[in-house]
Amino acid sequence: MDMRKIKKLIELIQSTGVAEIEIKEGEESVRITREVKAAPMMMMAAAPAFQAAPMLQAAPQAAETRSETPGKTAETAAAVPAADKHVLKAPMVGTVYLSATPGSKSFVEIGQSVKIGDVICLIEAMKMFNQIEADKGGTISARLVDNGTPVEFNQPLFVIE
């Protein structure tokens, strides 16, 4: 795959906020994933990393490209949590949904109090919707993911104080 095409795909992801894209051309394929990394508390911003990595089976000749640029965070900054804060992490790989149906009210909002067992979000994995519940009581102080974005195992989702 041509490096110019890969660079254009990276620019597309940066400008649209899409979290992941995979393109196949014949025997070659490339998958570009945006990863949000936590920034120091003073900066109050997260810098997503963009990576185009070859699919090992289908594209042994594809090149790897990495570019870092500052971007938007979910709803609040993905700051490093203090000792009194708890980070709720994804228990599985899938797509996160912040409400039960498109257009409906979110399960939780920033500043809302939650108790253990309250539904925080849904993660769709293999066509199954799994309720993600609060594992600690407190107040939601940060949302670290956007609705409809893919999440990895153990990826931070919410900060509970």
Image: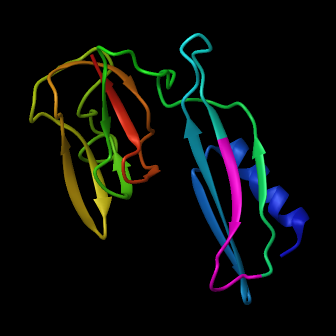
Q: Quadrant of the N terminus?
A: bottom right
Residue 158's spot in the image, x, y percent? 34, 31
Q: Quadrant of the C terminus?
A: top left
Whether residue 32 is situated above or below residue 90 in the rendered picture: below
Q: Nearer the viewer, residue 28 or 54?
A: 54
- Colouring used for the render: rainbow
Whether residue 143 is situated above or below residue 83 in the rendered picture: below
Please report the residue visible at 74 percent of the width from the left and 51 percent of the height from the top: 12
Q: Nearer the viewer, residue 20 or 35?
A: 35
Please report the residue visible at 50 percent of the width from the left and 26 percent of the height from the top: 78
Please report the residue visible at 28 percent of the width from the left and 33 percent of the height from the top: 106
Residue 152's spot in the image, x, y percent? 42, 53
Figure quadrant of residue 45: top right
Figure quadrant of residue 140: top left
Q: Which residues are magenta?
A: 49-60
Left or right of 98: which side holds 56? Answer: right
Magenta stretch contains residue 151: no
Magenta stretch contains residue 59: yes
Residue 119's spot in the image, x, y percent? 16, 38
**Residue positioned most to the top:** 42
**Residue positioned most to the bottom:** 27
Left or right of 1: which side holds 133? Answer: left
Q: Nearer the viewer, residue 28 or 91?
A: 91
Figure quadrant of residue 55: bottom right
Left or right of 153: which side holds 136? Answer: left
Residue 57's spot in the image, x, y percent? 62, 85
Q: How many marks?
A: 0
